[in-house]
């Protein structure tokens, strides 16, 4: 089964007006996303930010749980945060995954707007026989800029809700997509 | 199809040591959960807290987006926050749902530990022909106290991940459970 990786991208993203922006790193994004990733067997979570101060912030959020007294407080957070790697950009994440696995990852673009891509079920099937690692790319702010989509090998369709409302948080979208790709299929 | 409601309970909950505690309301819980709820057609989200100051806080988080200048800023947050009702406790949520729908809701207990309950697929099937509303109960902190389980009509099994790690955030658990209960089934 293909190794699954995830990257949370902070630049280039869109703001509500469709302009290209760099978003801030949110500590809760990191915690929620690594916990979901750990639950569903993701091999690594990359947080990509072009600004050094924000990367340092992410490192402090992570390292708090590896040093005293945080270390003693909650081993389950630590177990999840071990997945977290802090990088400058997508290229660095791709290079690290290639070094780890020996293969270039397949880049998967996610978006609340995508309609012409593949379903999670399709990707789940493909992962069964895929030798290359899969890298799911998630945007912050109002989503990934078009330049990121142009680099993608695959586009994942948006999560469809009840009546077209599609404004999930990135934390919720990550959770749902990982469950669809890797969740235990249960029987009635 | 049964109307679906959700209640986020802050007392009685457990802390990491298994003691009964009252947890604080987190603004991001409210935002994330109503956005997921709105996406999947939940009819109402109740946030239950016994302390008036915390209920007032939740009301401010909600009302910010209904008053100027927040009102102008983001209509999609408002659309989701319209689902939010602030109550003292579970009884008040149940009474409100009964008043709204004319029927007492079926209380569904959720927990990261539950193994002897029903699956989401089972509940999804049942909802197709169930005339009573369904109220999903979610805990904060380290989960709902046993007293809440005793009141439940149904227990929902925990979300199973890759290898027994089950420490999802409540925001992620809500997203996944709503997707499993109400998400659009997609084809390969």
Image (cartoon, coloured by chain):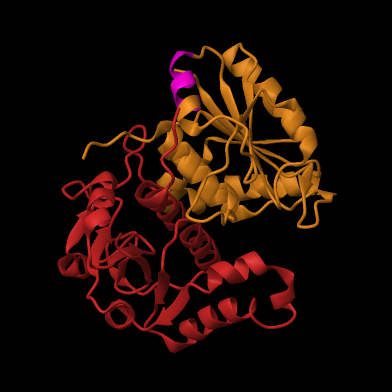
Chain colours: A orange, B red
- Horizontal side of residue B142 vs A120, given as left or right: left
Q: Quadrant of the N terminus of chain B?
A: bottom left
Q: Position of residue A8 (x, y in %)?
A: 65, 40
Q: Tell me if residue A22 comes above or below residue A120 in the rendering.
A: below
Percent across and percent down for residue B145 are: 25, 66
Look at the image and tell me whether residue A84 can be seen: yes
B2 left or right of A70? Answer: left
Give the main secondary structure, helix, strand or loop, of the magenta stretch.
helix
Tell me, yes or no, whether the highlighted magenta stretch contains residue A127: yes
User: Can you see residue A89?
Assistant: no
What residue is drawn where x is 41% and y is 32%? Answer: A182
Quadrant of the image occupied by residue B75: bottom right
Span highlighted in magenta in the image: A123-129
Measured as percent of width and height from the top left, residue B117 is found at 18, 50
Residue nearer the viewer, B22 or B179: B179
Report if residue A170 lies within the magenta region. no
| Relative horizontal placement of residue A141, taking residue B166 as reference (left or right) | right
Query: Residue drawn 69% across and 27% down?
Result: A152
- Above or below, A102 against A6 in this view is above
């Amino acid at each position: 089964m293909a190794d699954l990786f995830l990257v949370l991208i902070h630049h280039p993203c869109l703001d509500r007006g469709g302009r290209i922006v760099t978003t801030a790193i949110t500590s809760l994004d990191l915690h929620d996303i690594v916990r979901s990733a750990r639950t569903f067997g993701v091999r690594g979570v990359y947080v990509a930010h072009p600004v050094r101060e924000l990367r340092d912030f992410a490192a402090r959020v992570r390292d708090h749980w590896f040093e005293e007294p945080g270390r003693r407080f909650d081993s389950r957070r630590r177990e999840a945060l071990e997945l977290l790697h802090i990088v400058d950009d997508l290229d660095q994440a791709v290079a690290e995954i290639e070094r780890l696995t020996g293969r270039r990852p397949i880049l998967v673009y996610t978006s609340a707007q995508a309609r012409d891509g593949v379903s999670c079920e399709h990707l789940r099937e493909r992962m069964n026989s895929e030798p290359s690692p899969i890298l799911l790319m998630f945007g912050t702010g109002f989503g990934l800029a078009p330049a990121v989509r142009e680099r993608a090998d695959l586009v994942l369709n948006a999560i469809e809700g009840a009546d077209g409302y599609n404004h999930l948080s990135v934390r919720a979208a990550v959770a749902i997509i990982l469950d669809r790709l890797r969740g235990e299929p249960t029987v009635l």
